[in-house]
Image (cartoon, rainbow, N blue to C red):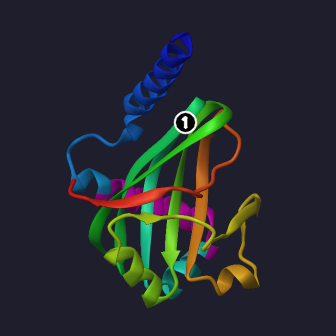
Amino acid sequence: MTLLNRRTFAFSAAAATLAACGNGIGTNGAADIDARVDSTLSYMYSAYPATRDLANKSTGMLVMPVVTEVGLGIGGMYGRGALRIGQTTVDYYAAAGASAGLQIGGQQFSHVLFFMTQDALSEFRRSQGWSAGADIAYALNDKGEMLRADTTTSSSPVIAVVFAQAGFRVGATLQGTKYTRIIP
């Protein structure tokens, strides 16, 4: 019974911590999300100029301005963003994920998924809930302002760029993140 109470407490604490973070987006809906998406894209293009080329080649981009991730044994992440085709927002999405294991800490980060083929974009939009997995290639920010995309990355149907990390957790991955369409 003590083990059940500890698990219940740990899960409740992790859920409450994640809910309290609120990832910086209030309840003003679409206008707030769009403003954060515009700001995130502006920052990304200025800090990582190579992403502008990715954007020009992509058929669409899912921009997640702030994703909050916390963990204390059991962890979770949540964020909201917008799918842009060209310069137009066509849908809004929530990103959520859960993890368990040896972990402690929290962080916030931004990420953009570049859909490089029409098939990848169509599959994403048709799905009831799309999960990020091994089919995503990462363009790595490995040297200050340089963004590295190798030949494997450039031929991938979906490319992820993760940036603007802040917090006290090491690394950010989108593996296991589920994206679901929302109405803000």
Q: Position of residue 55 (x, y in %)?
A: 50, 79
Give the vertical position of 160 relative to 94 (above or below): below
Visible residue check, residue 76 = yes
Of residues 170 and 122, the one drawn nearer to the viewer in this rendering? 122
Q: Residue at x 48, y 14 (%)?
A: 5
Residue 146 horizontal side relative to residue 43, left or right: right
Label 1: which secondary element: strand
Dot 1: few (<14), some (14–19), or many (≥20) neighbours within 10 Å? many
Q: Residue at x 42, y 68 (%)?
A: 62
Tell me the residue that label 1 is attached to: 75
Residue 141 horizontal side relative to residue 49, left or right: right
Q: Position of residue 99 (x, y in %)?
A: 57, 42
Q: Residue at x 59, y 65 (%)?
A: 161
Give the vertical position of 158 relative to 141 (above or below): below
Q: Amino acid at mark 1?
A: Gly
User: Would you identify the image quadrant in which residue 87 lies?
Assistant: bottom left
Q: Residue at x 75, y 79 (%)?
A: 150
Residue 102 horizontal side relative to residue 71, left or right: right
In the picture as drawn, the residue positioned furthest to the top comes out as 2
Magenta span includes 40 = yes
Give the magenta part as a residue range. Answer: 34-50
Of residues 55 and 118, the one drawn nearer to the viewer in this rendering? 118
